[in-house]
Image: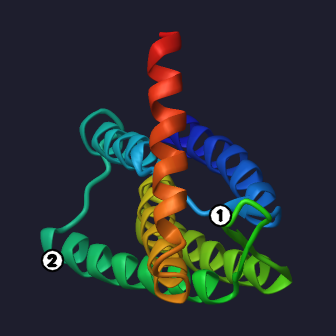
Amino acid sequence: MQNLSYTNIVLALLILYVVIKRQLEPRIVKFKPEFFIVVILLGISSIGDAVNKQHLNLAQNKIIIFGILSLISAAVFAALRALSYKFWLDDDKLVMREGNWLTIIWWIIGIGIHVAVDRIWTGSSVTLLLYLGVTLLIQRGMVWYRASSKFPQEISANVAAQQKNRSRHNRRH
């Protein structure tokens, strides 16, 4: 279980570094859930390994309670981070977004609470990747919603740019 816990922590730290770095830079608002879905699947796989191979024994009712509380926490901190973003239009009339110091504070508090509860509950950090994937997916959706609400006509240019990039990427492969 120890190796799985360390692996989750290393992967989570790597993901967090990249994500937080990108959240603090001015970026075009996009909604591409694929990466977050991969992180969620890795998290589910990690939990499955812990239960099946590492003999993580947890009562069914505790799993349900922790799961619900973890989802609520993921959603709350995703919302708080999304609310910390500022939005504007760039010179090409694309909707941009950027986080700030408050975004980092919400990350630290959210991850800190999750890891502390996870360690108490399972004695490991086995659910960290799943939590990250879920909170990032919710945050991305909320950022998209906020940007769409603030710039309802302009967001269509972001959709077109995202589709153009996707078709360009598909032609290369």
- Residue type pointed to by label 1: Leu
> Nearer the N terminus, badge 2 or badge 1?
2
Residue 64 rendering spot, x and y as whole percentages = 19, 75
Secondary structure type for disc 1: loop
- Residue type pointed to by label 2: Asn
Say which quarter of the image contains residue 130: bottom left
Which residue is the site of mark 1? 94
Secondary structure type for disc 2: helix
Q: Residue at horizontal 54%, vertical 79%?
A: 147
Position of 68 with respect to 156 (left or right) is left
Q: Residue at horizontal 53%, vertical 67%?
A: 119
- Residue 86 is marked as none
Residue 27 rendering spot, x and y as whole percentages = 73, 59
Which residue is the site of mark 2? 61
Q: CA distance from mark 2 to mark 1?
A: 47 Å
- Is 158 situated above or below 112? above
